[in-house]
Image: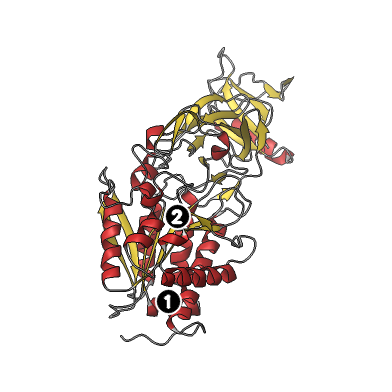
Amino acid sequence: MSLLWLYPVSSSKPRAHALVDVDQRSGCAKRWLLSTVLAMNSGGRRAGVVKAHGKQHGMRLATGLTLIGVILVASTGVPGAEITVSTDFEGGSAKVEAINSERREILIRPGGDPARGWPCWWYLRIDGLTAAEDAKVVVLGSEQPARNNGRSTGKPLAPDWALPDRAAISVDGATWLQTEPGTKKGDGVSYRVIGNGGPLWVAWGPPFTSRERDDLFVRFLAGSRGTASVFELARSREGRLVRGLRVVAPGQHRAPAVWVQARQHAWESGSSWVARGFMEWLLGDEPDAIWLRKHAEVCVVPIMDVDRVATGDGGKESDPHDHNRDWSEAALYPEIAATQRRLKAFAAEDRLDVFLDLHNPGPADRLPFLFVPPADVLTDDARANQARFLACASRQFDAPLTLEPSPRKTDSAYHPRWRQISRVWVSKHIAADTVAVCLETPWNTPHSTTAGYRAVGSNLGRAVTHYLRTRANGGDGIAPELPH
């Protein structure tokens, strides 16, 4: 591909009148463009010059009042239009260190305020790339001191948290794919991106904001045939709505309750995509999904920390603590307090069967795994139910994102505020037999795509269904009809 650049020859600095793509393989296209220049410029004849790849050719053009020069510029190796970067949209965040329009290279670090969570998330829009034009986005780790275990460490977060093997990329801000694997470049990673002639969005992982949530809810309500409704869980500390989807059969008021939530840590965008996959599956036509809709009340909150998702902050280890260290009788975040009230109401009716908290783990984790409370926090019934749920989940999670065979424990060695982590608090304070676990889905694999995350959500839905069916019928996986 080449570019046709029209400008006044008399000017000391070219001022572009038009920038047109030319297919280098087609001489006809070039001749057509030149004839178009002739047709556009009627009037007196003046001398023009054609330059192709820096070589002057003796061709004379009929021009108008302004002398027109024509330059054919190869799309590689020659500076193109100015590249611009913006982050002024929901979830946008990056510290732009440099933009080299001549080399088609952008250098960034994660943006965000360390007081609002780990600075590892980045999400930007690029303008100025022509169709099929190569460029590079080079990402370095944050230089800001990060918090951990409730206090500042005085040193930056390890850069691996901000440097996925593959970045997420979109030409419309809605459909997300992965780049090819990035290339290590000093302390950072260089990702190759290819322009499409319009805006290009690039991010740490596939973003999922309140806008995507609300658009999904509209679609779900339209196709749910009366089983789905949207509820407002709370207004955040900064005034944003925390919303969820409730799915239950009409007239079913005493069904076992399943609570699913994601994004207690804002940067873990993949967890919201897992929640989306769970909801899509739940409202679909698979027999297990139909059974679950008929026999359970399911509530899904795809974004808990709406404030830091909106501002492009990390969320994890926020000051004074993050959402998943806030589970106490004096919760700081309104959405946590509201969730606690709803869970207590389900437990008071003896029907909170499953609590699922969705997250993304560390950069080295390559398979999904479960976090569970320590055994001494659980009753005998809860331990038996947890083992039954783990067995169901291990059968449902298929390749390539199979479930690790052994769960990991949340105890005093994990975090100083381990008792204020959701799964532990639910197990200790809500119901004696509830399964309360955290699913961690890896973000740093070739399968950590929107499709991969949604497949994990579907598998999670099947695991929940098989667990409830098994529990309802003493282990044979066939549940009796519940009264309506």
Identity, as a three-letter code, of the amino acid under mark 1: Leu
With 326 as the anchor, is 50 left or right in this view? right
Q: Is residue 353 left or right of residue 199?
A: left
Check the image and report above or below for 157 versus 66.
below
CA neighbours of label 2 inside 10 A, class few (<14), some (14 to 19), many (20+): many
Depth order, front residue of 117/224:
117
Relative to 14, is 224 above or below? below
Give the mark, 2 or 1, whose residue is nearer the N terminus. Answer: 2
Label 1 sits on residue: 292
| Kind of residue at badge 2 | Ser
Q: Secondary structure at mark 2?
A: helix
Residue 272 is marked as 2
For this rendering, which residue is in front, 380 or 479?
380
Q: Position of residue 139 (x, y in %)?
A: 57, 33
Visible residue check, residue 174: no
Which residue is drawn at the image coordinates 36% and 52% (left, top)?
A: 304
Give the image location of residue 67, x and y in percent: 58, 20
Rendered-image quadrant of the N terminus = top right
